[in-house]
Amino acid sequence: MSAAGGPRRNPTARNVWLVARREYGERVGTRAFVISTLLLMGLAVVIALIPLAVRAVDRASVTKVLVAAPDPALATRTASTLEAFVNASPGSGDGGRQAFVLETVDGVDTAIQAVRDGAVAGAVVVERTTQGGLDFRVVTIGGLPQDRLLVLQLGTFGVGVVDYTSRTPVVAGANPFQAPTFAVVDAGAAGNGTGAQVDTSEYASRRIVGIVFVVLSFLTLVFYGLWVASGVVAEKASRVMELLISAATARQLVLGKILGIGLAGLTQVLLVLGPALVVMVASGRIGNAVFGEDSTAATSLAGLSPGLVAAFLVYFTLGFALYAALYGAAGSLLSRAEDLQMIALPLSIPAIMGYLPAVLALSGSTSGLIRVASYIPLWSPFVMVSRLAIGRVEPWELVLSLGLLIATVPLVMLLAIRVYRAGVVLYGQPPTVATFVRAVRGS
């Protein structure tokens, strides 16, 4: 007995570890764990194969591209000439299929903004060099597959030849032909479309990796958050919670549950990522076997960098701690397992609201909404991971996002502990906002 006459409690670290080991053992190896892991594995593999399906769709699609130049007349001539080169003519090997829709616009900035807004897949910006040749820049945000870019490059070479022959008489001493330059640039890298050149295959790989990370984070955070809530409800309904609270503090129980179930979630994440990465590595060979195009069908792991994996694990860990605390606090207010359905959807809404802008961020958008969402702690585990996968994050933005998330997690933990402490003695009351407020004040 302690000096106060109450039961002696073990040290905090030991109690937290005992609770965590108990929670981990109850989850890992169970039938539900195995089934959910297999389902997530299948989903991750399907996501990893999505680029091949997109590739098949792209082969039959028409790509809309804008043509712009500082000189409107040059833009018009380029579009009309490029049309003859990039779209198959009747009777050709491609069956006369139209691959591109080319439209001219007034102003280079207008064309680049249309790409940023997602209105078109890309824009061809053409300028005349000081030597009289042509300089072509394809401005895109990953919207053009590699084979379409190859067709455009061949087409721009033809435009350069036609432009040279129309301007230069074939006489001795005439200026030699200069092959037009061709580059693919990121629409978000600079205001005038002169940003760093991008590797479209690497960009596609980044989007694939981003999709896998975001979907996996969303499913596991919500799924294991519900496990935390269901575990708390089960203990309360069986009156086990009253026995546990006499041997350990509310803080030790909450931290132990989050740690144990969090380790189970991390175990499942690692098990799911393994097959997905294997499929992503093999998808290149699969694509080559299906499409027979080595350079355009292959999918690389160029977007999977150690830094991105580390960022994903950090955001996953902090995001789980945040959502698990919320689910645990809500579960302590319930008296029956049947009532868990009442809080499942409301608690999932914040995650859904973060998942949607995360998907938009994977398209390369850098709108104000997406930037703000990547700083909000409830959403940053999804949105910032998407932005990092695409590679459009300033260092200060990452510091701000992580700082806000790190500062929010202990605050939510403290709130969850207060609610958990008061929820032990709350029975038969509906889990309303008023009940939540009373639990916080009463603790």
Image: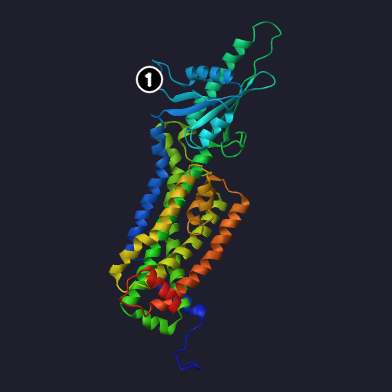
Where does the image place residue 174, in percent across and percent down from the top left? Answer: 69, 9
Where does the image place residue 409, in percent across and percent down from the top left? Answer: 51, 66
Q: Amino acid at mark 1?
A: Gly
Quarter of the view holding residue 330: bottom left
Quarter of the view holding residue 280: top left
Where does the image place residue 26, in percent across and percent down from the top left? Answer: 37, 70
The residue to which callout 1 is attached is 95
Of all residues shown, which one is farthest toward the left? Answer: 338
Task: Describe residue 182's horizontal placement relative to residue 65 as left or right.
Answer: right
Q: Residues within 10 Å of mark 1 (few under 14, many from 20)?
A: few
Number of callouts = 1
Q: Tell me: residue 412, above or below residue 200.
A: below
Of all residues shown, which one is farthest toward the front? Answer: 434
For residue 300, say whether it is visible.
Answer: no
**Quarter holding the C terminus?**
bottom left
For residue 160, say whether it is visible.
Answer: yes
Task: Describe residue 376's horizontal placement relative to residue 173 as left or right.
Answer: left
Q: Secondary structure at mark 1?
A: loop
Q: Tell me: residue 166, above or below residue 356.
A: above
Q: Nearer the viewer, residue 154 or 421?
A: 421
Task: Describe residue 106's horizontal placement relative to residue 285 as left or right.
Answer: right
Q: Tell me: residue 257, above or below residue 242.
A: above
Of all residues shown, which one is farthest toward the right? Answer: 173
Q: Nearer the viewer, residue 95 or 336?
A: 336
Q: Nearer the viewer, residue 365 or 225?
A: 365
Residue shown at 47% from the left, 73% from the top: 255
Where does the image place residue 382, in percent across and percent down from the top left? Answer: 48, 53
Residue shown at 41% from the left, 22% from the top: 98
Q: Tell me: residue 319, above or below residue 84.
A: below
Residue shown at 40% from the left, 43% from the top: 49
Q: Nearer the viewer, residue 313 or 159?
A: 159
